Image (spheres, grey):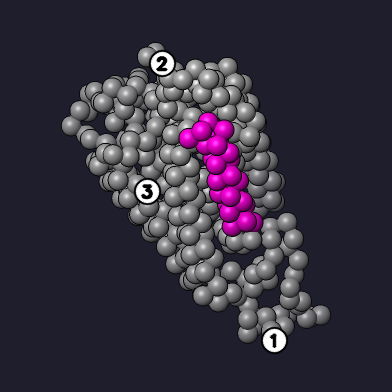
Amino acid sequence: MTNLPTNLRTSKHVFYIVLFIIAIYFLVMDIILYVTLQNNVLCEKNDGMYSPFRPLTVKLLMTDPFDHWITSPLMEYFDELTGFSDIFYFITPNMISIFHMCLTILAGKLVSSPSLHTRRIAVLVFQMHGLLDTLDGIVYRARTGKGHLFQSHRSTVGYVIDGACDTIGGTALCIGLAVNLCRNPPSKRQQNTLPWTKTDLLMDSPNGAATTTEKQNGHVSKFTAFFRCFSFGMQLLLAAAMWDKSVARLSAILQVPIKDSSLAALQVESLHSASTSIIFLLWRYSSAIALLQMVLFAIFIDKVWEFLTFILYIGWPVLIAVIFVTELHIRALREKMHM
């Protein structure tokens, strides 16, 4: 028993070290990506082995770091080493999409559990969904001759099915969170505090017993718990819709072939500009998938309520600001290139 606190502290230290290493890895890879972008143009042909740096597309440049630097390389190399897309020719991308949607429903069920251990299993199940969500795109590109060109194909049925499955998956996770918080509402002491300002809103009596106010209002209401989850779900929906729209609009400006040499030079200049890189960076950390990774991390460390409180006050202003700045940038690019 005496070794338990020491073991817990050691586990926390290991966890923080791993987290720090991942953060440094993301930072270094993002810097390499920026340098690579400055020396290349979009959609350069790459028929060789998979590389997370080529061929570059707008969609790839706006993909969240976890997917770009961990999930995608894992599944790309998995497909190249096993030949999955060729050997299992009878498994279609849509079948994979529907299967990983079922995994998200299972994860939503698990995340509603009062057991932290079960909720952590839900995180692992949802991460499996992420791997398969990446795999369905890889299989589609391999079988249609798209190679490693990472971009959306909006005119296909698969695009609609994959989008619907992702939407259902995000909804299932939010419902699971809402059920869990409504059944096990957090302490009212944390209702209006952000993660870095954990001050007690209610004081205990001198003898250590809770006050009458705390006994009557010890936990947040079910409506408050549901509203936090609903608000986060709406952020996910808005982030997903605007990210997809921004990818399409920026691709139509920066990724289309232009015959006029002067306009082509302006296109490359716009692509390599600092403002465009900032827009890409903002969306990498504001996309729906990035938000999902954040809430999954919060679930794993048992800080969901703190995260939902934080994202309620910070997430909306940041997301709206990113959307607004992106709109201004797109209009400036269109005006610059006479589109």
Q: Quadrant of residue 76?
A: top left
> Which amino acid, by three-letter code, is at mark 3?
Asp
Which mark, residue 212?
1
224 vs 314: above or below: below
Q: Is residue 244 left or right of residue 25?
A: left
The residue that label 3 is drawn on is 166
Residue range (magenta): 314-339
Q: Residues within 10 Å of mark 1 (few under 14, many from 20)?
A: few
Residue 333 colored in magenta in the image: yes
Q: Which residue is rendered at x = 35% and y = 47% of the image?
A: 163
Above-or-below relation of 321 to 130: below
In depth, the one of 117 and 244 nearer the eye is 244
Height in image: 221 above or below 142? Answer: below
- How dense is the environment of label 2, judged by Cα within 10 Å: few (below 14), some, or many (20 and up)? some
Q: At which x and y percent is residue 254?
A: 49, 29
Q: Between label 3 and label 1, give the one nearer the viewer.
A: 3
Asked whether the viewer can see residue 172, the reply is yes
